[in-house]
Image (cartoon, grey):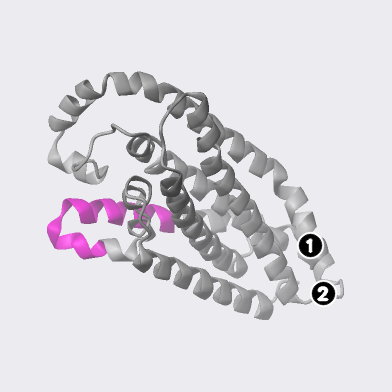
Amino acid sequence: MITIFIRTIKDRWRMLLAMCIIGVGSQLMYISLYPTFQSSQINYDDLMKQMPEAFKKVINMDSFSMDTIEKYLTMEMYSMFWLVLTIILTLSLAGSSLANDVERETIIQSASQPVSRTKIFFSRWLAAVSIYTAFNFVINAVVFPLCAVFNVDYLPSHFLAVGVMGELLGLALLSLAFAISAWLSDKGKVYMVMGGTVLIMYVLNIISSLKDNLANLKYISIFHYFDPNKALIQGQYDFSAIVVFLGIIVVSTLIGWWRWRTRDVV
């Protein structure tokens, strides 16, 4: 089990490095620009007041400006770009794991070894969890030295909150993608099915904020439960979201494990 875990880490470290470089580079760009942005904050506030109400609902900017680094990064980083990086990483980790093994028939070699399907599944899953956790830690921890370098005031506990909630969101997406990967035998189909599911949930979350009669649609979107405003700006943990994320992680992982243990892969 440890051998499979280590081999998976070695196979995916380049992906982790690339995603960390992109994420750290983005944080560096945004934080370095913040002092300049802060000097024109009044002009930005005036611009926001002129924006259509529908637009402000979609980006959730109807109740605050960007006069702190937490508000600024919520808008510039965590509401969109960080989500994109998280989706790409979790989807890639799941797709290049179980389904890819079946597609390339490398599972035959693993299955011929004295190791159970359960150990194969959880070795791959734990390796993917470790990679995503490392990515999430780096992206959030780098804020502290960058803010010190550019003399920007920040609230460490707020970044801890968004880091915890982001970790749970990422693991929920990863576990769901792993369950899909355990069912399919083609990594391309994993990308298509999971990518389509993520897109539908994201669109439903936007639609629910625009139409009052469709507001309940937000509850079936995983993105409704990740609220960077509450986590990063207010420094609060949404315990209902934590329950939902943990539920998705546990249920998806169990379904994926059951399917992988019982399916014909050789």
Residue appearing at x 16%, y 25% in the figure: 46
Quadrant of image for the N terminus: bottom right
39 shown above or below 61: above
Looking at the image, which is closer to me, 5 or 265?
Answer: 5
| Whole-number angstrom distance, CA of label 2 to CA of label 1 | 10 Å
How many marks the image carries: the answer is: 2
Give the percent coordinates (x, y) of residue 247.
Answer: 45, 73
Reply above or below: 124 against 38: below
Q: Is 101 on the left-hand or right-hand side of 61?
A: right
Q: Given contact means CB atoms under 8 Å apart, are the residues at marks 2 and 1 in contact?
A: yes
Q: Disc 1 marks which amino acid?
A: Ile
Task: Determine which residue is flagged by label 2.
Answer: 115
User: Where is residue 85 drawn, in percent x and y?
Assistant: 51, 43
The residue located at (50%, 36%) in the rendering is 143
Residue under label 1? 4
Number of other residues with Cα within 10 Å of mark 2, as a class: few under 14, some 14 to 19, many 20 or more: few
Within the image, what quadrant is residue 61 found in? top left
- Taking the spot 51% from the left edge, 68% from the top edge, the residue there is 249
Is 39 located above or below residue 110 in the figure? above
Give the SS element for disc 1.
helix
Relative placement, left or right, of 26 versus 113 is left
Q: Is residue 200 magenta?
A: yes
Q: Which residues are magenta?
A: 197-217
Location of residue 51 in the rendering, given as x and y in whole percent from the top left corner: 16, 32
Farthest residue, direction right: 113
- Which mark is on residue 203? none
| Kind of residue sitting beneath label 2 | Val
Residue 180 image position (x, y, % from top left):
55, 65
Based on the displayed image, in which of its 4 quarters is residue 81 positioned?
Answer: top left
Name the residue: 49% across, 62% down. 172
